[in-house]
Amino acid sequence: MENKAPKYIFVTGGVTSSLGKGIVASSLGMLLQARGYRVTIQKLDPYINIDPGTLNPYEHGECYVTEDGAETDLDLGHYERYLNRPTSRANSVTTGRIYQSVIEKERRGDYLGKTVQVIPHITNEIKRRIKLIGNTGDYDIVITEIGGTVGDIESLPYIETVRQLTWELGEKNTMVIHLTLVPYLAASGELKTKPTQHSVRTLMESGIQANVLVARTEHNLPKDVKAKLAQFCNVKKENVIQSIDASSIYEVPFLLHAQNFDGVVLDGLDLPTNQEPNFDTWKKFLERHQNPKQTIEIALVGKYVSLQDSYKSITEAFTHAAATCETAVKIRWVYSGDLTEDNVAENLKGVSGVLIAPGFGDRGINGKIIAANYARRNNIPTLGICLGMQIMAIEFARNVLGYEKADSAEMDSQTPYPVISLMEGQKDVSEKGGTMRLGNWACDLKADSKIANIYQSTSILERHRHRYEFNNEYYDEFVNKGFIPVGFNPETELVEILEYKEHPFYIGVQFHPEYKSTVASPHPLFISFIEAALSNKQIDNIHATGEKI
């Protein structure tokens, strides 16, 4: 496509939250990209927080970090996993950031004494943010997902902005896709369209006509139900698309494509549909994902396991890597707060690998240390991520180096053996939001290390989100006992990776490899971890059957 002004697609939601706007937006982006279009997706979140960086994971799920260090909504992870291209802070907009920007302009006198109002000042700032990515010339289509549901007070400025943009840019340059719910009432055996009708009517009261209706449903929508939705919601019959429950979120693009969803969108935007989509990578991935040759169980030891979205990128990284290994990975969710010396063996019995999860705060820390100790002593393949690496260091210092009171300064500021200490650049930081070591940082790997072999490189870039670091005062003691720092930031000598040479796979990384894993590019560290877990399972099976090794 020629480098013209981009087309804008807005994805709104109705009836209820958590219907899957992010998956629908990501699926559409993937379909359009497969047809040769340059696509990006951004998220407009109506909450007043500047970003989700200070939110409890139980409140909002995982905080996803972009390459340029933005703390964002977990939907940006979906965008990257489906499009196989990085997002940036420009892809994430919150009401808090909008109002912050407007107030800063007012304080500078940019509005020349005008009364600052929602219209036009807030809506103009939202428009500026929406167009920011489009104006780069890098994309043919910009998909904008609006958080929340139509009718929410918090979403009103965004909905008004969409109305203005559709009028300003014209109907062939913009499109509104409305995702809604068609519930099934088991008592009467009926699919009910009334909630969708009310949702669309609410959208129309704001001056917006949906161009495409995507109906979330547990049952296939009969033709008469689709016709009814089309008639009462003022859309073409072919523009009513069902989004039925799927066994995997990675099936959704194909279920939508089968209904010509991407074709309908391109027709509505007056864009060519003559290029056949290339799904080769996705089809290969799905074939392996849906037909694994073997199964393993991995224990994910964390403190937020009751809300699995808190570890969304980790579970998806397992999915991508598992497909590469033609393996099904079953996650055993282990709450670290319940682990003790007495029950750890029972809680980890039969698992082929252990992942020590990231997190913050002192709750559940002892359980993670106990899990790391058990996995190290029993040669269970173990991967520690961020805090997980720090836990592995603390456990090693206590049980191998003999420092019983070793700890992280985050958990115990008075510990006599702070093997994990506050980073030098963090010591004068008082504000919490957006002040950690964030985004992409370089890491040099020791050439003779397992990790260099895994990456097939001695220089990598990975994303970070932390304040505390391995204390280099203990460097020599760790090396002498075999838990070796093998990855370093080239500028600061910050230890990024530890690996235990006496163990088949016992690796801790300060960064978050899960953020870089996508369908098209599974992360090599997760692939290697699964391969080690498979080898561990085979050894366990040999021991169980009494066969000779």
Image: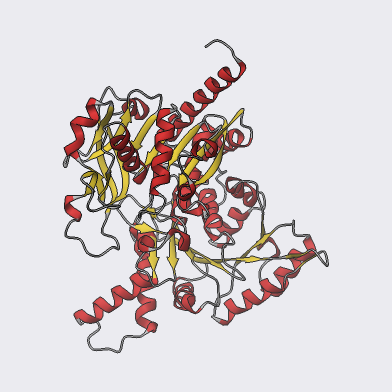
Q: Position of residue 131 (x, y in %)?
A: 37, 65
Rendered image quadrant of residue 183:
bottom right
Looking at the image, is 118 positioned above or below residue 373? below
Rendered image quadrant of residue 349:
top right
Residue toward you, 284 or 291? 291
Looking at the image, is 59 positioned above or below residue 301? below
Q: Is residue 83 left or right of residue 386?
A: right
Q: Position of residue 256 (x, y in %)?
A: 63, 52
Q: Residue at x 71, y 57 (%)?
A: 218
Q: Residue at x 44, y 55 (%)?
A: 62
Residue toward you, 422 or 154? 422
Q: Residue at x 25, y 40 (%)?
A: 442
Q: Position of residue 201 (x, y in %)?
A: 63, 78
Number of marks drawn = 0
Tell which residue pokes out farthest to the top in this image.
548
Tell which residue pokes out farthest to the right in this image.
188
Which of the colour schemes (rainbow, by chain, secondary structure, one colour) is used? secondary structure
Residue 249 in sight here:
yes
Residue toward you, 52 or 324? 52
Residue toward you, 369 or 251? 369
Residue 8 in sight here:
no
Q: Position of residue 160 (x, y in %)?
A: 47, 78
Q: Is residue 214 left or right of residue 100?
A: right
